[in-house]
Amino acid sequence: MWRQITALSFIPCQRQPPIALHIRRSSTLSDINWFVSTLKAQGTNLKTLKQAHCSMIITGLHRDNLIISKFLEACSITGHLRYAYSVFTHQPFPNTYLHNTMIRALSLVDEPNAHLTALQVYRKFWSLCPKPDTFTFPFALKIVVRLSDVWFGRQIHCQIMACGFDLSVHVVTSLIQMYCSCGGLGDARKVFDEMPVRDVTVWNALLAGYGKVGEVDEAMRLLEMMPCWVRNVVSWTCVISGYAKKGKASEAIEVFERMLMENVEPDEVTLLAALSACADLGSLELGERICRYIDHRGMKSGVSLNNALIDMYAKSGDIAKAFEVFERVSERNVVTWTTIITGLSTHGLGGEALTMFNRMVKAGVEPNSVTFIAVLSACSHVGLVDLGKRLFTSMRSVYGIEPNIEHFGCLIHLLGRAGKLKEAEEVSKTMPFEANAAIWGSLLAASNVHHDLELGERALNQLIKLEPNNSGNYMLLGNLYADLGRWDESRMMRKMMKGIGVKKMAGESSIEVENRVYRFISGDHSHLHVVKIHELLQEIDLQIQNNAI
């Protein structure tokens, strides 16, 4: 555990410490706050803190738990938590407030030993001063979340019930958050249902819990149950973000529009979730409405919001507008650069993407692993094999980034697209990962383009093991057989698909009309206006043929 530092192992100096501690035993709260602010300003090193502690011992102030609590807080803020813990262990009569301060300080650091120490402090608390308050349990429950120890959380729950704090909104909110974070969503719902009076924080705690584990439909039902006068922007954002993260962009947009209809003003987090949904859905009209809303409200667009705007425009097909937003923003981080590089690469503008990458490096912004996926993809678009290979090598040698399977996939795709099939297959064999479906699919596609039947057959054999129901793989090899004039093998592929029950995936397209996205699936005749849609498509097709002639 922690090696204790003896707090009283030094002899008080005769000279005056650098911090003047003119605090009487009858000090007012303002005096104590002045002392703490002075300590935080000057006490950034351990020597100064020890001198301050020395003065408190001389004046007898170390017997005042309130002053010691403030001292512990100052120690932890300045990074001397071990010394704070040592001082705490030498207090002869620590009260509830002092225990709360110590547990909270230990919960704020990312160190397992500190969290285990916090549990020890909590356990000893009951033998020294068994009078908890509304802060004791939330601090202890935060430690439970840090350690993911739901069983200890249940013990604390029993203590909460025994002490009569099960009606405290502050305590119950922490209890719900603990269960949600530790996989006890059912227990969290039970705590919620047994709470007779709930404020918005209790509702939002459970909403966030549902969103965190992906139970977004249940979160939506809970939002519907929530009284309209209780719902706030956080309530709506929990559901919108949950749908967006789950990939249910349409539902996220519907909830966002409902929120606006109820005159709830979105904050930056809400707008980020809504823009993410617009990007996934390709809803440019709604995305631009959100942009106008931001301008109309005079909201300051931070880095995250600008990144979301660039991403939305790029994914919605307006790369020129994405580039315009990028050039307009003054503050850019690695995500900003990576987003525009990805957008340019996705739109087939590989040369522009590589130029942007060079700008990024010259600007002193260090690329991350996602940046390299975009850059390697850009190299593939413009056929710069040698540059792509050099960039791949530079990941480890220059930037200290260990390539993952996605980077190897990009390199294999780059080589395969350029016709270097043997080298691409060799990379797949020598990389430190087992080739996945994406890599074998890339090799199959390359073999189809460059008419390498042997590689295509090897790739399909692997893909049948990894994703046997993906019709696209069978169709690719079937097309390769047909291109090579091997019609018997081509028909055999279709028979194989039919024999094992693999159905060809239907084509799908979408169109946005008046802020609503309509999806169309090949062979689906369920739309009310299907006849008119087909007539219009025939007319468009006829016009295209006439223009071609």
Image (tube, rainbow, N blue to C red):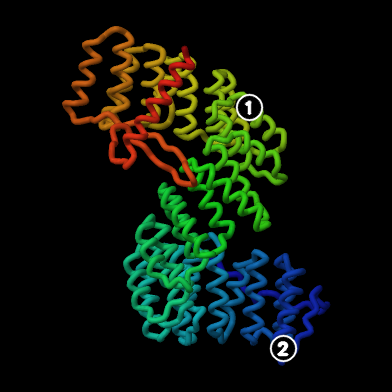
Q: Which residue is mark 2?
A: 28
Left or right: where 26 falls relative to 487: right
**Front residue of this view, candidates 239 and 189:** 239
User: Which is closer to the viewer, label 2 or label 1?
Assistant: 1
Q: Where does residue 142 sit, x and y in percent of width and height?
A: 48, 68
Residue drawn at the location 57% of the way across and 76% of the way down:
101
- Does 101 sit above or below residue 497? below
Residue at screen point 23% across, 30% down: 502
- Locate residue 221, reporting x and y percent: 36, 63
Mark 2: which secondary structure? Answer: loop
For residue 549, which numbered disc appears in the image?
Answer: none
Circle 2: residue type = Thr
Quarter of the figure with residue 439: top left
Q: Position of residue 484 (x, y in %)?
A: 32, 8
Is residue 68 positioned above or below 114 on the image? Answer: below
Which residue, as the protein is rendered here, is positioned at the far left?
A: 499
Is residue 32 visible to the viewer in this orientation of the structure? Answer: yes
**Side of 137 where 225 appears, left or right:** left
* Pick the front one: 317 or 513: 513
Tell which of 314 and 354 is nearer to you.
314
Task: Between residue 342 and residue 147, name the one nearer to us.
Answer: 342
Circle 1 residue: 352
- Using residue 264 as the reference point, say whether residue 127 is left or right of it: left
Q: Disc 1 on helix, strand or loop?
A: helix
Q: Earlier in the sequence, mark 2 or mark 1?
A: 2
Q: Amino acid at mark 1?
A: Glu
Q: CA distance from mark 2 to mark 1?
A: 65 Å
Residue under the point 41% across and 63% down: 209
- Picture coordinates of residue 192 (x, y %)? 37, 73
Q: Is residue 504 above or below residue 314?
A: above
> Residue at point 48% right, 84% down?
132
Residue farthest along the top direction in this orientation: 485
